[in-house]
Amino acid sequence: MNLNYEHLPVIIVALLLLAAFLEPIVYRHKKSWAAPLVIASMAFFALSSLYLMAAVNYHGPFNYYLGGWAPPFGIELEIDYLAVFLLLTFSVIGLIAIVYGLQDLKHGLKDEVLGWYFTLYLLLMASMAGISVTNDLFNMYVFVEISAISACAIISIKESRECIEASLKYLILSTLGSGCILLATAMLYMITGHLNIGYLNDVLPRVMSHYPNNILISLGFFVVGYGVKAALFPLHVWLPDAHTAAPSPSSAVLSGLVIKVYAAAFLKVFLKAYPREIFLEIPVMEIVLFLSVLAILYGSIVAMVQEDIKKMLAYSSIAQIGYVFLGFSLMGQRAVAGGLLHIFNHAMMKSMLFLAAGIIIYSTGIRRIRDMKGLGVKLPLTMGAFTIGALSMVGIPGTNGFISKWQLALGALDLGRPIIVVVILLSSLLNCLYYMPIVINAFFGVKGEPELEIGKVPGVMLYSILFLGFGIIFFGIYPAPLLAFLQKTVTAIL
Amino acid sequence: MWEGDELLGMYWQAIIPLWVVLFPIFMTPAIFILSKRSEKLRDGLSVLTAVITFFSVASLYPFVMEGKTIEYTLFQILPELGVTVRIDILSFCLAILSSFVWMMATIYSLDYMKPEHGKNRYYPVLIFTLGATLGIFFAGDFFTLYVFFELMSLVSYVLVIHEETPTALKAGYKYLIMTIIGGLALFFAIIATFELAGSVSLSKGVLVSKPSTLAFFAFVCYLIGFGMKAGMFPLHVWLPEAHPVAPSPASALLSGIMLKTGAYGMLRVLFYVFNIEVVQSARWDLLVAVLAVITILLGSAVALTQFDLKRRLAYSSIGQMGYVLLGMILFTEQGLVGDIFHIFSHAFMKSTLFLAAGAIIWKTGLRNINDLAGIGRKMPFTMGAFTIAALAMIGIPPLNGFLSKWTLSLGALEAGLPIYVVILLISSLLNGLYYLPIIIAAFFGGEEQEHAHGEAQHVEAGINLRGEATAKMVIPMVILGLGCFFLGLFPSNIAYELSLKAAVFLFRGGM
Amino acid sequence: MIDIEVLSKLFNNYYYFAAIILFIIGFHTMLTHANLIKKIIGMNIMETAAFLIFVSIGYIEGGRAPILDEGFDQIYMNPLPQALILTGIVVAVSVTAYALSLIIKLYQHYGTVDADEIARIRSYKP
């Protein structure tokens, strides 16, 4: 260990925070440096995540004591397979979204708030990185709050009526969720005296028979808390407005990453902190499973009737987060791996779709699906990428959406629940019903040149969605290394 | 199978399936790029690709006739699941048939598509679909088969809606939704098979040898998935919409070849996933039989009520696919021979009919059967080919339709189910009722009429309206029509030999 | 009697009891009131309840601050929850400030802080 990569997780979080607070100053005094700074920080994030992944894959997971204080007193970071997997997902998609965003935001935001946008973006990334690596429930709560505020602010930064309203709604519900998470954490601390996930896992089996009520309350509040934040049905009400109103790169990050980070936090709390026996006595996972099934169906059905493309994508996200929770709540090896895989895959698909929608809005101003007739002739590459994303959503073989569906379905069958497979298939069909008409309308049925005003699409925006589109195909054809890695992740968790 | 010394000797044959799948797929972008430069090059390259593909497939002939099979995995997509290639006699049968008909249809397209729009899209898609279809036949496991099946189904959507009229778009949407439903059913079936057997390979013998609830659902889902493609009742609803709206060469391929992929899939399911004992002991074959009989009668009966030429042909296809489905669950060797031979026959007959119908529409703009009186005098070759194929459909002796029906009937008798023979006869009668009037009217009825409406359409394109369609259209049609004749003339022709070998092969366990 | 047992449990843990009541009040206010300011107040009450629970976990009757002098046998309170809750309070304050600023913006747009009213105004828009 000649290179001290152990410090890297802390450095990532600290550096992102530092960059976040430098950003407004830089923006005020040296405007041209602001964008390179945010890109450089995100690139550093991505590269060090990659390095961490390689290191963890090679040397195995490790724990890091913040400030040298060992647990139970100090804060512990656990950099296991799960953490590096999440870090890599967030950093790469985050980097692509902001590279895209540099162009789009100049168009969509007022000039003076751009610096603040970067601040919020980096804060969001820092908090997501923090949630991924921390092994301490209270620390997690703090990061969750940071991410909640920055996620709300990233929506309200446009200061239009819809944005303010959406972000206030989001903020109120999100605070509700945070309150629940804090209360649940308190319940666990009350009976165990620990906040460290590892210690909780040790102590809880011993005390659970003495304090069944505390356990029950904490489970309930955690489900509600993370459920609200991850927009698990029926706690999703804030999501459609919020993700629709935000600027496109924000929508991409919010839908692609931010709701996933809470799902991952849910996974950490439920499968790493609580011992497995609890779920035999208290069927909380069954409830989550039921909710996720409802989420899948509800999200897909409501998405069908949407007129605004971003709103449709947002409802689709509600369904897709249902897949993630479905995988987690089944608690089988393959199912959890499928849920994690879907975090990654959906992050790629949905951010790509939102970014593609962003290009459409950027260059034509069209938001309504009905008006998109003939768009494929004018924006062939954008709509081509959109088509790839749509096919992946439906789960056509050759795209990564197929792989996660396969994994989830097989996971459900492993546990003898073919009905779950039927739900997954039904939802694929519903996805087809609302994604395909967009694609068809865009490419076919208009003869000659469609009458659309098309602005110029900056190359950077196009390249970023093409890159994601390539990723969708690549991981659809060659998911083997990713699956092998997730196999290790899941074995470590379960 | 790879085995020691034979390894080197077999090497080049092993490459061919890969080559014939990838070659058209890789030519697609080339054709697309060339189409911007020159129409001639685009057309030439498309035909060349189809021809090379056909001859590549044909070069496997001596190899498969020795009764050898090759199977190998290219790379893994998921653990235990990869892209697997397999050559055996059954896949060769279907592949040679498809690539031949495809070649004819591509040549036919050259002139037929001239007045159409969107040719730069048509040719690449046509060639790509060829690759995907061959991929289905050369797939070594159900996973690979499924991947190519979806690929073919989705890409052929573009062929269906080529005209981009509202009708075409509506039909295409129906097609797309049904395709996705079928695909999802297949997904379930394959994943259930994988769960039950731990593998979906074609070389592991019978995968599911015990009937269970999950196995039954898997079977039903296979039936939905492949039956949808094969136009089985009640999943046929897309077929009579989608086939008529496509450009005629594409209709010929959709009806002649792509329907067969469903039948091929069912054959593989019946002989590789389950086996005769499982299906028969659990009485699942009854389900298929009932649906097949309904399909036969419904297809033939509804065809009678259609007056759009291509719609009538499409309904006729439904009926004919019923024969194929029925043939495979007779579970006798004779029945299976008839079944596979009928796949050949129907491909030849129906593509001839659709190409002839296309020539008529192209030439005169007439689609309604009642307007076709006297057309045979104007377009003798087209109607000649049409007549041969239609008579074969009815099952008039020396034609191939007769031979396949004869063999199927023998199979049914061998299985002790004479009722199926009656059904075949009823259906033949119905076929006669809806094909003969067209032929009679075309040659003997009606006075020479001026079809001003048809002329106006082609005046700009500068095509001679008098008499026959162009040679590039007539020749493929006539070749396919003569195929109907020669493949029925002797019961020892190539197609029959292949069917026989394939049936024996399947009955011996298909390894 | 079971009732007395429950009552005495409640009495002994009155701070938890108070916290739960506060939590419910806050929750209720937050979800049912249309006035946005009241919603924010409810939010604060709810968070205070969570803080109270957390702090009271570390509370010991008669305990004192954990400053070590001569004797080691003194009863002292667990300082960790208090330290944590300081962080929690900071978070809550910033959330409140941010929420209030959003409400001011909304007031500028709509001239009201009533959520129902805002919804009504919005629905008038084409």
Image (cartoon, rainbow, N blue to C red):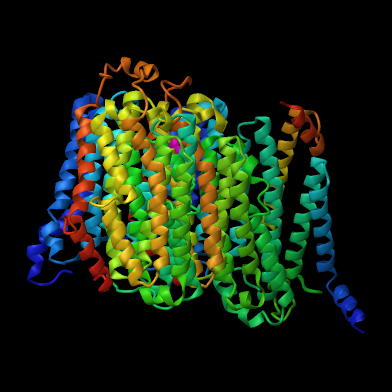
Residue B411 in sight in this render: yes
Judge whether A236 appears above or below B337 on screen: above
Q: Residue furthest bottom?
A: C1
Q: Is residue A262 magenta?
A: no
Can you say which quadrant of the picture contains the N terminus of chain A?
bottom left
Apparent side of residue B391 relative to residue B107 in the rendered image (left or right): right
In the rendered image, residue A492, in percent from the top left (x then y), is placed at 45, 71
Q: Which residues are magenta?
A: A97-101
Viewer-proximal residue among B242 and B130: B242
Residue B405, image quadrant? bottom left
Identify the main secondary structure in magenta: helix
Residue B172, image quadrant? top left
Apparent side of residue B24 relative to residue A107 in the rendered image (left or right): left
Apparent side of residue B111 relative to residue A427 in the rendered image (left or right): left
Judge whether B362 appears above or below A290 on screen: above
Residue A106 in sight in this render: no
Query: How many circles with numbers are drawn on the protein?
Result: 0
In the rendered image, residue A119, in percent from the top left (x then y), is placed at 54, 39
Judge whether B242 appears above or below B281 on screen: above
**Which residue is drawn at the image coordinates 79% and 46% (left, top)?**
C39
**Which residue is drawn at the image coordinates 51% and 42% (left, top)?**
A435
Q: Residue furthest front?
A: B444
Viewer-proximal residue among A155 and B50: B50
Viewer-proximal residue among B22 and A13: B22
In the rendered image, residue B506, in percent from the top left (x then y), is placed at 27, 69
Apparent side of residue B20 relative to residue A288 in the rendered image (left or right): left
In the rendered image, residue C12, in percent from the top left (x then y), is placed at 85, 75
**Which residue is drawn at the image coordinates 25% and 43% (left, top)?**
B102
